[in-house]
Image (cartoon, grey):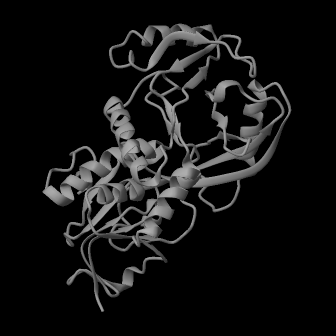
Amino acid sequence: MTKSVEYIIVGDGYAAMFLAHQFIKNNKSFLLFTEGKKSASMVSAGMINPAVLKRFTTFWLAQEQIDSLKNTMTEIEQYTGQNYLIEKPILRVFHDEKEKELWLKKSDDENLKPFLSKDFVRLNSVKNPFDCGMVNQSARLDVRGFFTNMMNFLESQNYLIKEKFDYQLLNTNDSTYKDISFKKIIFAEGMAVKENPFFAEIPVHQNKGHHLEVQLSVPLEDDFTIKKKHFIFPLNNGNYYYGGTYDREQIHHKIDDTEIEKLTNALAEFYPHDFEVKEVKFGFRPTVKDRRPILGNHPEFGNLYVFNGLGARGILNGNYFSINLYHHLENDEEIHPEVDLKRFQ
């Protein structure tokens, strides 16, 4: 017997979860296929950061994306019972006095004024002789809680299919997959898109990131997220996240000891107490050269769509452009030209 749904989502990262939310919110019938492997999203830091903290700049649609995410998290709370935004700001440790002066100068810029606080912070738990700058409107996501509860909800509502999607069983002519009839299918697979015969050629590139779970002998104060070379913040189990790295060259699926050494050395530089590495994790971010996500339908098969290339800002991009994609799918609204797949055709 054929089961009929409006949509199929293939994937289980931020793109898939936020698109699923749009379908839930608007009472659309759908199924989500998950292979059950940990995606890059699931091991991400979960940073919500409107500032680029290397150069003290902001990025495209930063304020709009922050506002949209807060609204979405309130909506998700209505059916999972939890809001996963941890509204503790990011503190950027200054390397020297010049960085501090540059921060002050940039904080007068109209685009940066909402984000770069002029009030500096001095911490006791880490070395910060030149103080720290506070990023207003920054936060982090409870990544583990978000994915665990979203998956549990999807399963409880019979939206979830825990199996690897088999492209060979997809019939594009009559819009069926096995015994499922659908109107449209969205592939939101991250780097697994390279195995997808319909979208393997889209220009996403692997960016490998390692991070550590560490136990600190002296806790950090006030649950802030602290950033020097990398981010550090408390986890629910009493340990801390520290990372992550960015590596476009190493694409093997194993831990790189060189990257771990870089992380432990960087942590020791500004954390003056003993710490112990409890676990090492890594994932592959799907990035795009122009730093814009990729949304759109297949040039030949109009009922097949891709949602990919979220990069390091997966939470903000995933949420914001899931809304754009939803309105395109349902109301034929245009996909923003800067993220449309057509820009590569």
Q: How many marks?
A: 0
Image quadrant in which you'd find residue 331? bottom left
Of the 4 image quadrants, the one containing the C terminus is: bottom left
Above or below, 210 against 167 in this view is above
Task: Tell me which residue sits at (47%, 43%) in the image.
Answer: 83
Instruction: Give the left or right position of residue 79, taking residue 337 as reference.
Output: right
Instruction: Give the left or right position of residue 299, taking residue 286 as reference.
Output: left
Depth check: give the residue in front, 308 or 197.
308
Q: Position of residue 205 (x, y in %)?
A: 46, 54
Instruction: Give the left or right position of residue 79, taking residue 27 as reference.
Output: right
Q: Position of residue 7 (x, y in %)?
A: 28, 69
Task: Tell me which residue sits at (30%, 92%) in the image.
Answer: 1
Task: Tell me which residue sits at (20%, 60%) in the image.
Answer: 329
**Residue reaching furthest to the bottom:** 1
Q: Position of residue 14 (x, y in %)?
A: 44, 53
Depth check: give the residue in front, 189 or 254.
189
